[in-house]
Image (cartoon, rainbow, N blue to C red):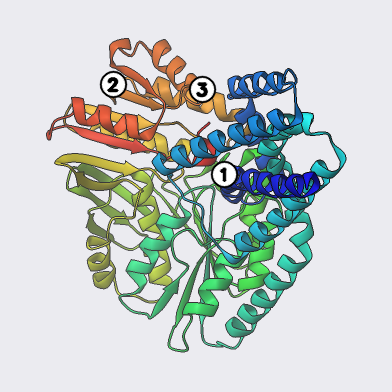
Amino acid sequence: MNMNIKIISNILLVCLILISLIVPSKHVLHIFQQNRYDYKRYFDWIINYFKNNLIIVFVYLVLISISFFLKSINSVIIYVSIIYGIIAFIFFYKESKKEYIKPLVYTSRVKRQIFVLLLLDLIVIVLFLHYFDELYLLLFLFISLIMNWILILLANFLLMPIEKLVQNYYLNDAKKKLRSHLSLINIGITGSFGKTSSKNIIQSIISEEYRSLMTPASFNTPMGITRTIREQLKPSHQVFVCEMGADHVGDIKYLSDFVNPKIGIVTSIGIQHLSTFKSLENIIKEKMILIEKLPSDGIGIINYDNEYIREYNIKNSCKIIKYGIDNSDVDYQAVNIKYSPKGSKFKVKTKEKTYSFETKLLGKHNISNILAGIALARELNVEWKDIIKAVKYIPYIEHRLEVKTINGLKFIDNAFNSNPVGAKMSLEVMKMMPKKRIIVTPGMIDLGSKQKEVNYDFGYSMKDNIDIAILVGETQTLPIKQGLDDSGFKSDNIYVVKTVKEAFALVYSIATNKDTILLENDLPDAFNV
């Protein structure tokens, strides 16, 4: 009878443990996904997370020590069950209140990870209950709450052969479909920043003349591009505009071999993803591979304002088209740029003639991206009058200096993946706006050893361009705060908050409909620790 009671109590305990693991496991899957299943990025996040949550570890250790003073095994089991139940309730309650910037996407890959993780959890729990005394149950409570941070890596390792088979099937199917479209003009776009904006602008311009397909949103990885080709490419498409992302050496070469672009565009080169590329030299070589992999009758379109692009010796005899704003030794140059809350006006100088343009887009980098689109359109024989019309009606690009009204207030939304060049240009735009000028930012991320320096400079540059600074994340924004202080920025106008929700509450309490609020970078949940 006692044996039956023990079996039943163990089954109930296993169920309680699994229930208490639901939210932590979801968190693990979410962070692993946001870190792109990259082990180094994931480990860096874990170190920061646990450093910032030492108090929780202390509370668990206190709870564990109490169990060793209990006089009977039944008391231990009851105590442990109550603690598991309380923790599960707290986790579920907190999760129900939490608003994620980028929620977990339940892809097929994530579903496979959930299945394997559940099996691993069951194995670990059963082994523990079989080999260890009940006195150690609360110790296992602590272990169980952190074990999935490690088990997810084992689950990923075990699933690798399956993931590889699935990926190869879809990749080969996409390649076959792409190669069968003989008349399709493939265009590759890469750069440390400006890729997505340029892609959207180019799509708007060349759609005046061609039936064009572009990779949506930030679908710039092999599987994102594969999905676009398999689900959206039609025989009627004439042009395929493909954004190519890279955060490791070899990524652009792989994508170039996959897509085989006839035309390549490099928008910029900088220190974005320095933590994974390891050096600026690796970034430069990787981005320029797109141009060097073009066929001899291909066309390379490059931003000649960027010093790294300008100084690079391109090892390809294909046609090269240069564009720029600050550099006049180019084929297309934007001059006389003027900003207003309604948009931008500028002229484009070519070797033959000068043309006048207007657009609702703001920022020097958007003008630069428009130049890339103009250069491409002319190479595809789109008439100037059609290009001018298309540029005038280019829609705002989501989260990239997008002007919008929220609850009666005017926002400039530049919340997508801020970078040093883009952040500087955002401040230039803000300088021309009517006061009060308010910035909400967590700063810049994923910049390796340069991150503190870049964020310090960002904070220092806010003086005279921003009137009120709202910094999101106490640890993350320390360099920005230091830069603000050293620049002489008024300390009463600097606010540091923990969450985006708190930041918006503060904005609504201090801003009027005559003010301008800049949202600079959204800080994915994986970095918000």
**Helix, strand or loop at mark 3:** loop
Q: Which residue is mark 2?
A: 464
Q: Who is closer to the viewer here, 352 or 142? A: 142
For residue 358, which quarter of the picture?
bottom left
- Is residue 471 visible from the viewing direction of this image? yes
Q: Earlier in the sequence, mark 2 or mark 3?
A: 2
Q: Residue at x 35, y 43 (%)?
A: 414
Q: Which residue is mark 3?
A: 475
Q: Is residue 347 left or right of residue 89?
A: left
- Is residue 99 visible from the viewing direction of this image? no
Q: Who is closer to the viewer here, 84 or 462? A: 84
Q: Residue at x 65, y 33 (%)?
A: 78
For residue 473, which quarter of the picture?
top left
Q: Earlier in the sequence, mark 1 or mark 3?
A: 1
Q: Which residue is mark 1?
A: 27
Q: Position of residue 359 (x, y in %)?
A: 23, 55
